[in-house]
Amino acid sequence: MSRLLPPDLLSNLKNLRHVVFDFDGVFTTNEVIVREDGVESVICNRSDGYGMRLLTESGVGVMILSTETNPVVYARAKKLKIECVAGIESKGEKLVEILAEKNIPAANVAYVGNDVNDLPCFSLVGLSVAVGDAFPEVKTSARWVLSESGGRGAVREFCELVYRAKHDIPLSQSVWIYREKRAPQKLV
């Protein structure tokens, strides 16, 4: 792990208790398909579901925080079995409220975003993360920029690296093989 991440970032990942994700441009490709009847659809990456499982297994809380009002945000969160707060005006104000309600120290929280409306949240958490195709000012403000783009593996990349850090899994070993070795074996 140390060849990939600086020691202070690795420490942040090991101590992570909660991750807050933006939706559009993080879980999605930041594109929208609008049908002639006005119904909107987005493209998400199915591998994110496995990523959510890794965070949950590591004891890390997960939520989506979005200004988007489209019901697809809640539908995707429900499918992934994660908490969702959407249709809000100020992400920063809402994040402060949520962390206070949950009694989670900001130092133990990561926020993953892609656009300028995520910037207020970056200054409120211990680890600010931008997806690979985030807007330039977001990348500049983030402590860590992922290699993958939103909706194209960024969420999975982040989740796997958190899991690796929390379980001291070297880069040469598959996260999935490690999980299988830890699982109780069934007797035949």
Image (cartoon, grey):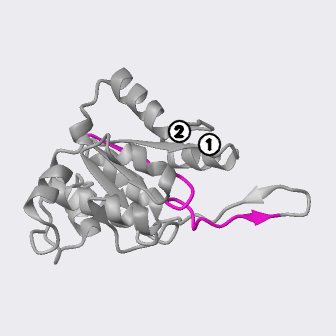
Identity of the residue drawn at 18% across and 74% down: 173
Q: Main secondary structure of the magenta part?
A: loop
The residue sitting at the right extreme is 37
Quadrant (top left/top right/bottom left/bottom right) for the N terminus:
bottom left
Contact between labelled residues 2 and 1, with CB atoms less than 8 Å apart: yes
Query: Mark 2 = which residue?
Result: 84
Quick check: can you spot residue 106?
yes
**Residue 120: image tag:** none
Q: Secondary structure at mark 2?
A: strand
Residue 168 sits in quarter: bottom left
Q: Position of residue 100 (x, y in %)?
A: 34, 23
Observer able to see residue 83: no
- At label 2, the amino acid type is Cys
> Image quadrant for the C terminus?
bottom left
- Relative placement, left or right, of 64 versus 173 is right
Secondary element at tag 1: helix
Q: Nearer the viewer, residue 116 or 103?
A: 116
Q: Is residue 176 left or right of residue 93?
A: left
> Which range is magenta?
17-34
The answer to which of marks 1 and 2 sits earlier in the sequence is: 1
Horizontal relation, residue 29 to residue 41: left or right: left
Q: How far separated are the C-alphas under marks 1 and 2?
A: 6 Å
Residue toward you, 50 or 140: 140
Residue visible at 24% across and 31% down?
Answer: 105
135 drawn magenta:
no
Q: Label 1: which residue?
A: 74
Question: For mark 2, does the 10 Å Cα neighbourhood hold few (<14), some (14 to 19), or many (20 or more) residues?
Answer: many
Q: Amino acid at mark 1?
A: Tyr
Residue that protrudes farthest toward the bottom in the picture: 172
